[in-house]
Amino acid sequence: MIRNFYSIDYQVHSFRSHDGKASIAEQCSKAVELGLDEIGFTEHKDFDPFDPEVNYFEYDRYMQEIEEARSAWKGKLIIRAGVEIDYQIWFEDKIAEYLQNHSFDFVLGSVHYVNRKMIMTPEYNKTHNQVSAYQSYFLEVLHSVQSGLFDVLSHLEYANRRGIAAWGPYSPEPHRDVLTAIFQELISRDMAFEINTAGLHQNLGVMYPVEQTVQIYASLGGRKITIGSDAHHPDQLAWQFADAAQTALRCGISSLATYQNRICIMKPLKA
Ligand SMILES: [Zn+2]
C-alpha cells in the first residue's frame, strides 16, 4: 500500500517485451520494496508483419516466469499476467484469433499507429493539421474500443508523446465529440480506462490522458479505472502513482479495476 491507497501498477514491461529493461523478478522485487499491492505485467504483443519485433513475445516463456514469480512472492504481492496489444484496424481478426488461443488476466488495447504510420512522426504529420492529426488517432482508438477485444483502454492521448512537440500545447476541447463517443462505447462495454503516468517520467509534464479528459469520462458516468506507469525499468515503477490516484479522486472516481482471468474485481482506491 502506498500512502493509504490500494496501489496497483497495471502497465509494466520486462525483458519479455522487446524494449524491456528488467526481468519479471526485478520488477516484482521493486514492487514489494515500494509497497505495491498488485503488479500487472503487460508485455507488448504486436501483429504487424513489417515490424522487425513482431515475433519477439514468447507466451510460454512469459507464463513460466510469471508462475515462478508468483511462487517467489506468494503472500507479498499479487502478480497478474496481462498483455499490451498494438491495435491496428486491419489486423483485428489476427488479434481476435490470438486472444482465443492464449489466456491472460487482462488485455490492454493500445494505439501507436494509424494508417501504418507511427502517430505524430513527421511522416504521419505530413498529411495532417493539428486537429486532424489528433482526430485520426482518436478515431482509431474508437475502433479499438468498438472491436470488443480488450479489457482496458490503454494510454489514451499517447499521441501527445510526440504530438506536443509537433503541434504545441494540447487541449481535449476540440475533440470533445470523439472523446464522448469513445467513452460512451467504453462504458457500454464495461471496459476500464487507464490513467498512465508515463508522460511524467518521459518529461512531457502530462499524464495519458490529461485530467480534463478524465473529467469528461467521469461526467459521462465512467468510474472504472486502472493506473499504470508503463515502467520498462524498475526505476519507473508506480511512477507518481499518488498523483494519478488524486487525479481520479478529484474527478469523483474512488475505486480501481483489477483483473484475474479477464474477470474484473473492483477495489476501493482509498484504503
Ligand atoms: Zn503502449
Image (cartoon, helix red, strand yellow):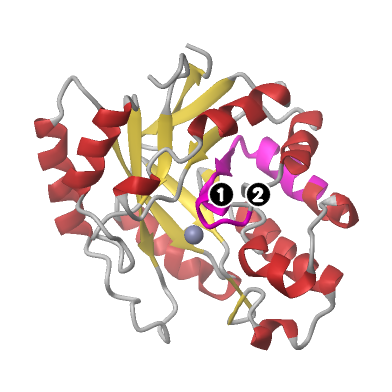
Which residue does the image show at 15% across and 25% down from the upper left? 74
Percent across and percent down for residue 110 are: 53, 58
Q: Which residue is mark 2?
A: 206
- Taking depth in this image into account, of 263 and 113 the one nearest to the observer is 113
Q: Earlier in the sequence, mark 2 or mark 1?
A: 1
Give the distance between the C-alpha atoms of the residues marked 2 and 1, in whole angstroms.
6 Å
Describe the element under mark 2 as helix, strand or loop.
loop
Which circle marks residue 200 in the picture?
1
259 in relation to 155, above or below:
above
Contact check, label 2 and label 1, Cβ < 8 Å: yes
User: From the viewer's perspective, is 26 left or right of 130?
Assistant: left
Residue 192 among magenta residues: yes
Percent across and percent down for residue 50 are: 42, 87
Describe the element under mark 1 as helix, strand or loop.
helix
Residue 78 makes an appearance in the image: no
User: From the viewer's perspective, is 157 left or right of 233?
Assistant: right
- Amino acid type, label 1: Leu
Q: What span is colored magenta in the figure?
A: 180-204
Quadrant in the picture for residue 189: top right
User: From the viewer's perspective, is 78 left or right of 187?
Assistant: left
- Taking depth in this image into account, of 268 and 85 the one nearest to the observer is 268
